[in-house]
């Protein structure tokens, strides 16, 4: 049996945390096989060579447009890939709609972690670069949708992660300050967006991170699971004077 990796306790300098913004792909659900199936359906219609999970995970996390461009690049000359992009994107979205959630699995301790965060009094938002309708469908499939105050997809606003706009919009929707919010995700994009919005950031080690080692991510710490993230946040809040004052008032 493999022993889970141990990570140093996160060092959070934020005030008492009252909300968490959580990524979807690679954080709550492993969707790499869905991406691969949808892309292969697209590539078949374009008469192009199939892709693989190993290739796809290097591209996940930056939105559908980036995913399509990355898969087309090694299969077509540059000008041809650009010419076929709109066609490819439309085919991919249609193919993905057929299989969204079919090959997906929930990561361990996600349900327990979300429950622990809620029990600790945190408001929850899901911010993902996945198209909004696909994100909502997945969250409903796993009966998680009702746990979130708001779900923001990659097509919900003018900009997506790593831009801070969707993170700030989620804070507005939850009516919480960014500095009292923690961003939790598996990739550098999640940490970049959170930091740019003035949030605490925590990284999960089991996702995709564009094919790069998780240790390259500049966040406030790595936590082994969403449940461990909840424990770290609870410990942080317990140590804050304002948390203790509220608990005894």
Image (tube, rainbow, N blue to C red):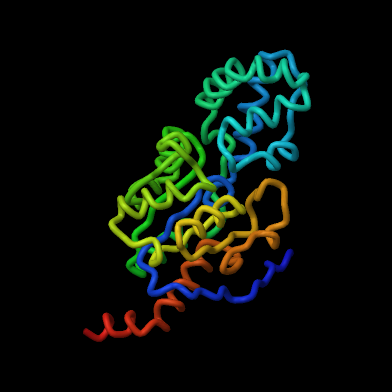
Place residue 96 in its image quadrant.
Answer: top right
Relative to 92, say whether 127 is above or below.
below
**Residue 92 image-quadrant placement:** top right
Q: Residue furthest left?
A: 249
> In this image, 12 relative to 222: left or right?
left
Vertically, is 5 above or below 23?
A: below
User: Which residue is at a point 44% across and 45% down the rendered structure image?
Assistant: 142
Q: Position of residue 245 (x, y in %)?
A: 28, 84
Quarter of the image for residue 1 reads bottom right
The C terminus appears in which quarter of the rendering? bottom left
Q: Residue at x 70, y 19 (%)?
A: 81
Percent coordinates x, y for residue 239 in the rendering? 42, 83
Q: Is 211 situated left or right of 109 in this image?
A: right
Q: Would residue 197 be found to the left or right of residue 82 on screen?
A: left
Q: Nearer the viewer, residue 136 or 193?
A: 193
**Residue 226 location (% of width, % of height):** 52, 61
Residue at 41% x, 43% y is 152
* Residue located 43% across and 46% down the image: 166
In the depicted structure, whether residue 232 falls above or below residue 26: below
Count of numbered circles in the view: 0
Q: Position of residue 109 (x, y in %)?
A: 52, 60
The residue lying toward the viewer, choosing from 182 and 233, is 182
Residue closer to the observer: 87 or 193: 193
């Amino acid at each position: 049996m493999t022993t889970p990796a141990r990570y140093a306790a996160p060092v959070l300098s934020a005030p008492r945390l009252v909300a968490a913004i959580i990524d979807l792909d690679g954080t709550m659900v492993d969707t790499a096989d869905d991406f691969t199936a949808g892309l292969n359906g697209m590539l078949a219609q374009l008469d192009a060579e199939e892709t693989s999970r190993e290739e796809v995970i290097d591209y996940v996390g930056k939105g559908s447009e980036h995913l399509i461009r990355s898969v087309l690049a090694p299969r077509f000359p540059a000008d041809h890939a650009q010419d076929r992009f709109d066609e490819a994107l439309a085919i991919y979205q249609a193919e993905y709609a057929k299989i969204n959630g079919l090959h997906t699995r929930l990561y361990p301790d996600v349900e327990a972690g979300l429950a622990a965060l809620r029990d600790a009094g945190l408001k929850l938002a899901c911010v993902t670069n996945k198209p909004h309708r696909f994100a909502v469908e997945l969250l409903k499939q796993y009966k998680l949708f009702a746990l979130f105050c708001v779900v923001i997809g990659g097509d919900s606003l003018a900009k997506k992660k790593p831009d801070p706009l969707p993170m700030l919009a989620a804070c507005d929707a939850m009516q919480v300050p960014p500095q009292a919010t923690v961003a939790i995700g598996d990739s550098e994009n999640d940490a970049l967006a959170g930091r740019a919005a003035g949030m605490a950031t925590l990284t999960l080690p089991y996702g995709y991170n564009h094919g790069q080692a998780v240790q390259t991510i500049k966040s406030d710490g790595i936590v082994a699971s969403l449940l461990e993230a909840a424990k770290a946040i609870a410990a942080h809040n317990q140590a804050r004077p304002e948390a203790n004052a509220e608990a005894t008032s």
